[in-house]
Image: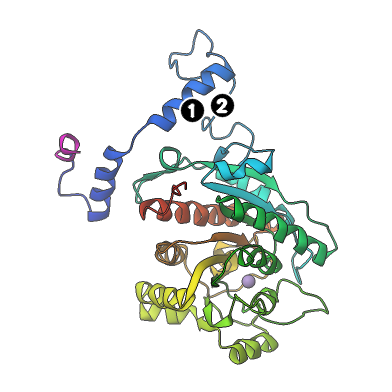
Amino acid sequence: MAEHSHHVHDRHGPEAKRALELEALLPTAGRDREIARGLEYGLQGADSIVDRSIPTFSRGELPHYAGINTFLKAPFVEDVRRCGEYDVAILGAPHDSGTTYRPGTRFGPQGMRRISALYGTYSFEFGVDLRESITICDLGDIFTIPGNIEKSFDQISKAVSHVYASGALPVVLGGDHSIGYPTVRGVAEHLEGNLGIIHFDRHVDTQETDLDERMHTTPWYHATDIPNVPAKNLVQLGIGGWQAPRPGVKVCRERETTIMTVTDCVEMGLDVAAERALEVAWDDAEAVWLSFDVDCLDAAFVPGTGWPEPGGFLPREVLKLIRRVAERGLAGIEIVECSPPYDNADITSLIGTRVVCDVLATLVSGGLLPRTKA
Ligand SMILES: [Mn+2]
C-alpha cells in the first residue's frame, strides 16, 4: 500500500483517489489461477501469439464476446447438490405466465447472462474484484411449467429453499414479479424469526388476485400472508404513476406496508431514504430479501420490461440506493421483469446485471461475503 499510494496524487476526485488506492491492494491470485487453468484446458496459444497467457480455446473472462454465457462466466454447476461449495449461486426463474401485459421475461435469465459477459469481475469505484474475493456458481434455470403458475411457484420455492439451505447466497434472475411470492416462501421456511422485504418497483404488487389468478401484480399479498413475513417489514421504493391498481393500494393501506415514492426518496435524500428502508425492513427481522423490479427505473432506461412507466428512478439514483440497502446484508436477491424480446441494445438486461454486481460488491466491501464457513 505505502509504496503504491505515493503515486496517487491529490488532484484526483476523492472517490477516484480512493479507487486508485484500493486497486493497489487487490490480489491477482484468482486471475492467475484462471489463466493457468485456461492454458491447461484450452491449450497453449498458437506460436504467433506473443502474449503467452492466451490459450487456443477461450477459457475464462477473455475475450468478452466469446465463451459459454453463464452469469459473469461463473462455472456452470450441473450438480445442484454442490451449490453450497460456493459463496453465491445464480439461478434463473424463467417464468412469465404471471404477466398481464407484455410477456417475455422467461428470457430474462438468458438476457442477463448474455450481457453479463460484457463485465469483468472488478469495479473501479467499489475497489472490489469479485474473482479475487468470492466464489460464484451458475446453477442454470429452474424447470418452470409454462401456463401453470402454481406448479411453477412450487418449483421456484423448492429451488430457492435448496440454495438458501446450502449456505450459498441465492441470486434469482427472473422471470416476472409473480416469482416474488415463491422465492420469499423458499427462504422464510428456514427462518425462526421474520423476513423483511425491500421492494424496488413502480407498482405495489399487493393485489390478492389479478385476472382471477396470482399474477405478477400479487406477490406481496401472498408473501405477507406467510406468518414470519409480516407486512410491517415490507418497504416499497419507487411506487407511482398510472399503473398502481387501486385494489393493491387498498391492501397496502390495510396491511400498513411502507411506501416511498421516487419524489419521496429524491427529496428526502437517497441516504435518508435508504436508512428509513433499512429501519422498516430490519425491524425485529432476522433477515431481509431484496426484490428488484427493473421497472422502478424510468421507462427510458428499461424498454425491455412488462409494464414500463415514465417518471421512475435514474440509474445512478437506484444504484446508490441499492448500495446503501445492501450494506446490512441480505438473505438473497431477485431481479424481475426483464424482458429481452422488448429490450433495445440490451440496456434493460444491463441494468439488471449491474444491480446484481453492485449488491455482491457491497457485500464484499462490508465483510459479509465471502461467508464464513462453520
Ligand atoms: Mn413493476
Way the structure is coloured: rainbow
Ligand 1 sits in which quadrant? bottom right
Is disc 1 placed on a helix, strand or loop?
helix
Cβ–Cβ under 8 Å for marks 2 and 1? yes
Question: Which residue corresponds to mark 1?
Answer: 34
Q: CA distance from mark 2 to mark 1?
A: 8 Å
**Left or right, 257 with reference to 318:** right
Q: Which mark is residue 210?
A: none
Dot 2 corresponds to which residue?
59
Q: Is mark 2 within 8 Å of ligand 1?
A: no
Specify the quadrant that holds the N terminus. top left
Q: What residue is drawn where x is 78% and y is 61%?
A: 152
> Where residue 171 sits: x, y (%)?
58, 54
SS under mark 2 = loop
For disc 2, the neighbor class at 10 Å (few under 14, some 14 to 19, many from 20) is many
Residue at 54 percent of width and 48 percent of height: 88
Q: Which residues are magenta?
A: 1-6
| Residue drawn at (51%, 30%) of the image | 62
Q: Is residue 254 left or right of residue 24?
A: right
